[in-house]
Amino acid sequence: MEPERTRQQLDPAGTTGVWPVTITICVGAFGYAFLVTVLDLDEISNPAFAVLALLALGMAGFIVMRASQPSRAPLTGRSHLVAHSLGFAAIVLEDVSHWGADAHLQDDWGPIALGFVLVALSPYRPARELSSSGILSSIGVGFLILLQIRSFSTDAPASAFIVVAVTPMLALCLSAATFSYGAVVAVERWRKRSMEASATLVRDCQGGIARSVRKDRVTILDRDVLPFFAEVLAKRELSAEDRERARDIADAIRRVMVEEVDRSWIETIIELTQRDNPRPGSISDVVSDPDHVASAMSIDQRTAIRALLVALLEQPGFDWADLRIAFVAVDDRSHSLISATVRLPERAMRTRFAPYVAIIRALFANLEVDFTQQMLALRFSYELY
């Protein structure tokens, strides 16, 4: 499934630091609504609905803050729909609380508060979704203004009241959509440039890689094959032992070449990262990928997994012997597991690996994370085709 065109899904690492800003905006919107309500108590004809309006806005802000937590990424369209519905319900409840006594339209906090909620959602939802939902809500606000226009103390055309009511929300809504669109375009532009740079680097390195491969093959020949040939030429005859030795050398070379061809990128990373802290045994004891589905990961997914493995390696007390990575293909999905022993208290473990888990959660589906008995376990899935 293609990621949505949101900053959170296209740049999960860069979006993890936005959460405090989201909290500030949601809390600020509620604080503004509460202050306006207290200052305009004389215009409230139905106090119970005023309280319900604040509760609805508070719930909308709470949903946005909770759903935007890095550990719960990504924020879905469903969360946006629920939060937006509660925000619009707050507008309706506030209007009912002022019904028949709302003399000054500029005292209504509902449209502005909902606009700030949309601003808080801008890093997490697509621009089209933000703008369309904001415009629909503006139409609803305009209809509510027409229903209560007789209570206003100012004598002006209905269109003027509607413009005054919806302009702040539309401005905030379109600002949120513009920010979302601009952030997505900037990330896509950066990714395109990085891909072009990577392609250029690959072309520049191909010659060196080919020479390195040839050097490895020559090393194998110098170490095993050429000495054997020299011995055979020196004896000028082949014995049964020579034939058996030739067969063993051929099988060993064939086995090494097959292993290198079948080796996945994650096995290569394991081999490279454990050079300074070698692990006894074969890499196949660490990585189980019988269907070779690790290669189906996207570049972003591979980067996230590699970052987690490097973080585990740098953790004091980490032992390669406790690392297990498994990939199992089921229909058109790969169900995967990464588990490791981390000698840290559970709370410290959560804090240490929270950024990596947040990024993995944004890139993979159905992520489940367990922090139990000094064991870190991640279960996730991704599409193969």
Image (cartoon, helix red, strand yellow):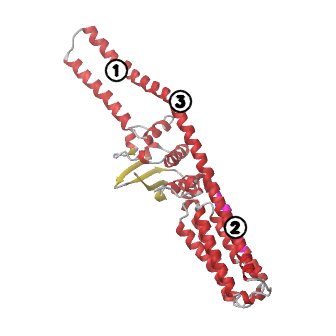
Residue 30: within the magenta? yes
Disc assigned to residue 204: 3
Q: Kindly identify which residue carries mark 1.
A: 224
**Residue 3, relative to residue 315: is it above or below?**
below
Report which residue position mark 2 lands on: 172
Foreground mark, 2 or 1, reads 2
Instruction: Decide which of tag 3 and tag 1 comes sooner along the chain.
Output: 3
Quarter of the N terminus within the rendering: bottom left
The CA distance from mark 2 to mark 1 is 72 Å
What amino acid does circle 1 point to? Asp
Q: Which residues are magenta?
A: 17-31
**Residue for point 60% across, 62% down:** 127
Task: Tell me residue 40's x, y (percent).
Answer: 77, 84
Q: Tell me residue 106's x, y (percent).
A: 77, 79
For label 2, count other residues whose C-alpha is less than 10 Å away and answer few (under 14), some (14-19) or many (20+): many
Q: Is residue 326 above or below residue 64?
A: above
Q: Are marks 3 and 1 in contact (CB under 8 Å)?
A: no
Q: Quadrant of residue 118?
A: bottom right
Mark 3 lies on a secondary structure that is: helix
The quarter of the picture where residue 32 lies is bottom right
